[in-house]
Image: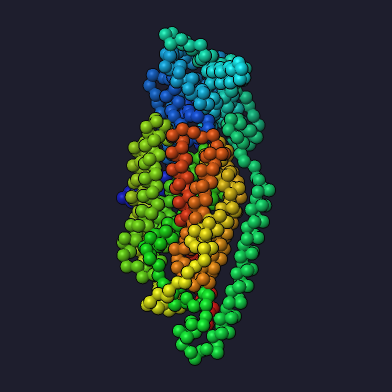
Amino acid sequence: MTALDTFQGRPCLWLPVLLLLGSGHIPGVTSETHYQPGDRVMLYVNKVGPYHNPQETYHYYQLPVCCPEKIRHKSLSLGEVLDGDRMAESMYQIRFRENVEKRTLCQMQLTFAQVERLRQAIEELYYFEFVVDDLPIRGFVGYMEESGFLPHSHKIGLWTHLDFHLEFHGDRIVFANVSVRDVKPHSLDVVRPEEPLDLTHTYSVHWSETSAERRGDRRHGDDGGFFPRTLEIHWLSIINSMVLVFLLVGFVAVILMRVLRNDLARYNLDEEPNSGSSTDDFDQGDNGWKIIHTDVFRFPPCRGLLCAVLGVGTQFLALGTGIIIMALLGMFNVHRHGAINSAAILLYALTCCIAGYVSSHFYRQIGGERWVWNIILTTSLFSVPFFLTWSVVNSVHWANGSTQTLPATTILLLLTVWLLVGFPLTVIGGIFGKNNATPFDAPCRTKNIAREIPPQPWYKSTVIHMTIGGFLPFSAISVELYYIFATVWGREQYTLYGILFFVFAILLSVGACISIALTYFQLSGEDYRWWWRSVLSVGSTGLFIFFYSVFYYARRSNMSGAVQTVEFFGYSFLTAYVFFLMLGTISFFSSLKFIRYIYVNLKMD
């Protein structure tokens, strides 16, 4: 039996493999091409777009530039398509180790409308991206100079000559860059509407040998410094976060354990002389968290939704941990983010079984009977908001002709992955979770009639708990959050995956500690409605992250325009929603573990 025979008839098996092959990077497999002197080196044109709007990109041939009669596109991986790449063959004739001096690429006559299109692109700081042997090379479309107030000067020029610098080691290309140094731009300032503009595009190619054997050995990076260099470790910020977290966790742990020890000693000591009396008599003379022991494990309303939140939150915890571990193992190419996109899709599809299992398992434990509805709610809790957000963002890209618009074939592929992998795994996980569910086994019996909750002071309200529970975890990651935003929505390159893993662990630890403290204070006020409160208190960190995204857009970035704005706030909303699910799950299970601990150690009749 061949490997192909093994996958025939089993689409759920070959689809993850297909996604892995489309991720743009497989460990141990290099995409470098070996050349002989004189072999043609294909240069692909890719995309153009405003420098300050990373997600607003358009096809290079949408500009009035030298274009072949028949455009031939390169087949792309899934990750490259998701990253907005649309590579096509160019007219540049480049041969391995053969220098070229000012060769004519094409001659053009531009209409006034085409010149205005170029002027607008240059004023918006359009940059272009070419690809040579999987090495991206970037440069600006034109030149703009604006100086003085009185008199004011505004000059716009188009780069009609490009110098390509390529370095090789043996028979491999290890570096590629484009330059316009010592090149005079062609002025677009004096153009008459009735006269066409004659342009001659030229280019030069210079080869040089280097001792660097691998592409990552060069100090100036793959793009020659066009984008900012890779972020350096910010030790001061990391130390600041560590001190804050250790003080916070230590404070919560010491204070809480000390208070708990006193409470347990007092409650258990008071119980011994009254062992012969009834529980009701004891309740009348007691107060605090012990008095609600017959209500603290009363199941909450909307238990199906709660279990779905816990299931999807657990799934994203596994997904985030998996992505960071894969990055630590060096499975992603730093300068091309397509691999991370494909890996995230693959892991999301495979971890759907975790969401189904956790949700169905806990739903059956707390007495849920409509487990089919619970599975549907679980699989829809993230996919439906994601689909609605993506539909709006993709429609805006499509209306503006952006390359970020997903082709129909890619949409069908992603839908097929969800239908044949994600949804079935959710159902399978739900079946296993339902069948393996054990009784909830609460340490205390629950009365049929709920106890009346006394009026609570303002500082124990849900809003205050959400403010405290959301702000403290956010403060622990606020510094690192800037660098992540600068990578996703800017031009930085993030490689500090070890630091990211450490900050992620800090975030979960702080969330768990804050949740336990807030739950204790809530129970001390004889309020037993902790189920949803524990989810909302620390899950509100997602709100702070969304507020930070608004601040980042307004104060820390130069993004503008409808395309970039819709994409930024749409996916920032989804990011905040994912953090709500993750941290709400951590908060709930931490509170549940804590409540079980304190009531198991309490002596009661």
Q: Is residue 306 left or right of residue 140?
A: left
Relative to the observer, which residue lies in front, 202 or 504? 504
Q: Is residue 584 left or right of residue 242?
A: left
Q: Whole-percent x and y of residue 162?
A: 55, 20
Relative to the observer, which residue lies in front, 163 or 477? 477
Q: Whole-percent x and y of residue 498?
A: 60, 50
Q: Whole-percent x and y of residue 136?
A: 53, 31
Q: Please tell me whether residue 172 is drawn above or below residue 91 in the rendered image.
A: below
At horizontal 60% and vertical 27% (from top left) the residue drawn is 167
Q: Please tell me whether residue 570 is drawn above or below residue 52 in the rendered image.
A: below
Q: Please tell me whether residue 248 is drawn above or below residue 8 in the rendered image.
A: below
Residue 193 visible? The answer is yes
Q: Whole-percent x and y of residue 289?
A: 52, 74
Residue 174 visible? The answer is no
At horizontal 53% and vertical 30% (from top left) the residue drawn is 51
Relative to the observer, which residue lies in front, 559 or 386? 559
Q: Quadrant of residue 251?
A: bottom right
Number of numbered labels in the structure image: 0
Relative to the observer, which residue lies in front, 208 or 275? 275
At horizontal 37% and vertical 32% (from top left) the residue drawn is 399
Q: Residue furthest bottom?
A: 276
Q: Please tell me whether residue 39 is drawn above or below residue 480 in the rendered image.
A: above
At horizontal 63% and vertical 58% (from top left) the residue drawn is 245
